[in-house]
């Protein structure tokens, strides 16, 4: 039957040793010089051009925008061009033969398909896993809902994400809307009604936006975006309801270590969501990166508020940043930043991905057998009766399974088809992490 053991979960006791680890920051791509270095060189020795977005894949590589190029940095730290640099615009050509004008945002879905928002050419394109590129939306002459997306005319693209069902979402700050392209290629307004401002939360298509910028999507297909000049991070659920999740609407820097809804923000333009729902975002004019934990409290995790460059290989909160425009959660558990004005991609290291050591209840979680070849039995005790969320996350940070377990009852989780290796099992309730343990798959 294997080894049976219990874990008393206060996150600092398992997996990461969280509370004792300091966060540091370092450059992982770029030299600080505006330019474009060759493929095949070390990323930290290669000039790049004002990166505005960063994304990661399941293999531990990361990608960033560099004006007319999309560049990849592999796990050995070597940079290559994966899209842009060509003159073509037709569908089905190699991505490196395609012309990109000004790539603003990137998103890579669970299948490895890359989406690019090109605000220069006002199109959204996707690069499939074979390296071929196709237009998803834009390049047309019409602005009405319910038409084929490739006939639509955008005003000024910013963010792009895709959900697990194949819908693609993009923000257009010029039109003050967020759009959804469904799986049949039809475009619809998803949020906003074309007027800049603030009219409160509620039905997303009846809410005014004010320069919607970077976007993220969680494992439940809720869409988050930085409502830049409303000084808020907002969430749109799958029923089309919009709600503020960070920000009071006031401009500035206040509220650290307090309620996220009471905090002042300073021009947020990018957002990322952890596997368990924590929110990370960049205050571009405040030159800080901030984080909302499972208890709904906001904290600064990088930047001292002074614009410029400095602080590499030291404490992240003492570093100077230059207008962070993109953010992504790295496979290592770190946080990648597109440090735009500094012409660098930087990483906050030693940060616990999706885990917080504040306001977490201690529970007892029995998991056996472990190591496991097939089905894992999970028994949760020490909490109120009822059903709780449970996810299995790969070491790259990808959610592989989402289910529910009932407290006080042994539950089976089948991981027969998973490759051998290490996995993280997380139990949560309403976004609050209750327990976690490492699982070894034989």
Image (tube, grey):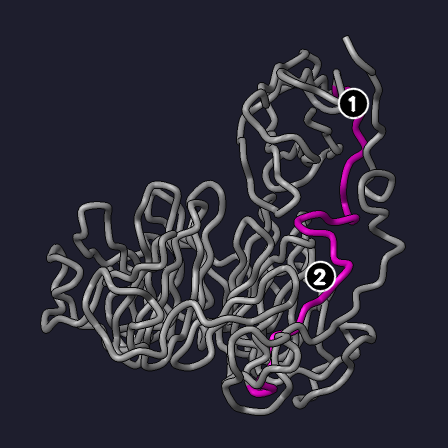
Which part of the image, by quadrant, shows the N terminus? Answer: top right
Q: Which residues are magenta?
A: 341-367
| Residue position for label 1 | 382
- Comparing labels 2 and 1, the label whose residue is closer to the camera: 1
Question: Image quarter for residue 159?
Answer: bottom left
Between 131 and 319, which is closer to the camera in this rendering? 131
Whether the magenta-drawn stretch holds residue 351 is answered as yes
The disc label shown at residue 332, or none: none
Asked if residue 318 is positioned above or below residue 24 in the image, the reply reads: below
Locate residue 152 relative to residue 3 in the image: left or right: left
User: Quick check: 426 left or right of 238?
Assistant: right
Q: Residues within 10 Å of mark 2 (few under 14, many from 20)?
A: some
User: Between residues 80 and 67, which one lies in front from this camera angle?
Assistant: 80
Helix, strand or loop at mark 2? loop
Mark sitting earlier along the chain (2/1): 2
Label 1 environment density (alpha carbons within 10 Å; few <14, some 14–19, many ≥20): few
Q: Is residue 103 left or right of residue 433?
A: left
Residue annotated with mark 2: 258
| Label 2 with label 1: CB-CB less than 8 Å | no
């Amino acid at each position: 039957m294997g080894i049976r053991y219990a874990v008393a979960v206060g996150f600092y006791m398992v997996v990461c040793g969280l509370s004792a680890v300091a966060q540091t920051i370092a450059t992982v791509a770029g030299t600080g010089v505006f330019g474009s270095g060759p493929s095949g060189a070390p990323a930290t020795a290669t000039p790049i051009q004002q990166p505005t977005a960063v994304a990661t894949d399941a293999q531990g590589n990361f990608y960033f925008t560099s004006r007319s190029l999309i560049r990849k940095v592999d796990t050995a730290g070597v940079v290559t061009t994966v899209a842009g640099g060509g003159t073509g615009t037709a569908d089905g050509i190699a991505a490196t033969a395609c012309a990109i004008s000004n790539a603003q945002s990137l998103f890579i879905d669970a299948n490895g398909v890359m989406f690019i928002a090109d605000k220069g050419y006002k199109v959204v394109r996707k690069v499939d896993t074979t390296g071929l590129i196709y237009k998803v939306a834009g390049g047309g002459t019409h602005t009405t809902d319910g038409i084929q997306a490739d006939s639509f005319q955008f005003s000024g693209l910013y963010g792009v994400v895709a959900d697990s069902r194949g819908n693609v979402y993009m923000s257009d700050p010029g039109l003050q809307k967020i759009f959804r392209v469904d799986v049949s290629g039809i475009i619809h307004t998803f949020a906003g009604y074309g007027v800049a401002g603030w009219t409160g939360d509620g039905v997303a298509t009846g809410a005014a936006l004010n320069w919607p910028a970077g976007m993220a999507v969680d494992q439940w297909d809720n869409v988050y975006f930085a409502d830049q000049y409303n000084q808020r991070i907002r969430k749109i659920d799958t029923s089309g309801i919009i709600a503020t999740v960070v920000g009071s609407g006031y401009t500035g820097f206040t509220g650290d270590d307090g309620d996220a809804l009471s905090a002042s923000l300073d021009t947020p333009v990018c957002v990322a969501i952890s596997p368990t729902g924590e929110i990370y975002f960049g205050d571009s004019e405040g030159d800080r990166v901030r984080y909302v934990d499972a208890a709904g409290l906001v904290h600064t995790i990088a930047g001292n508020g002074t614009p410029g460059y400095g602080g590499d290989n030291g404490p992240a909160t003492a570093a100077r940043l230059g207008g962070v425009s993109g953010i992504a959660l790295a496979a290592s558990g770190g946080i990648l930043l597109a440090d735009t004005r500094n012409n660098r991609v930087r990483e906050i290291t030693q940060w616990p991905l999706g885990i917080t050591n504040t306001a977490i209840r201690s529970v007892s979680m029995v998991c056996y057998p472990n190591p496991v070849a097939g089905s894992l039995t999970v028994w949760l005790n020490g909490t109120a009766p009822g059903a709780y969320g449970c996810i299995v996350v790969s070491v790259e940070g990808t959610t592989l399974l989402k289910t529910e377990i009932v407290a006080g009852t042994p539950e089976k989780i089948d991981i027969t088809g998973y490759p051998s290796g290490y996995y993280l099992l997380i139990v949560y309730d309403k976004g609050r992490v209750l327990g976690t343990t490492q699982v070894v798959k034989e």
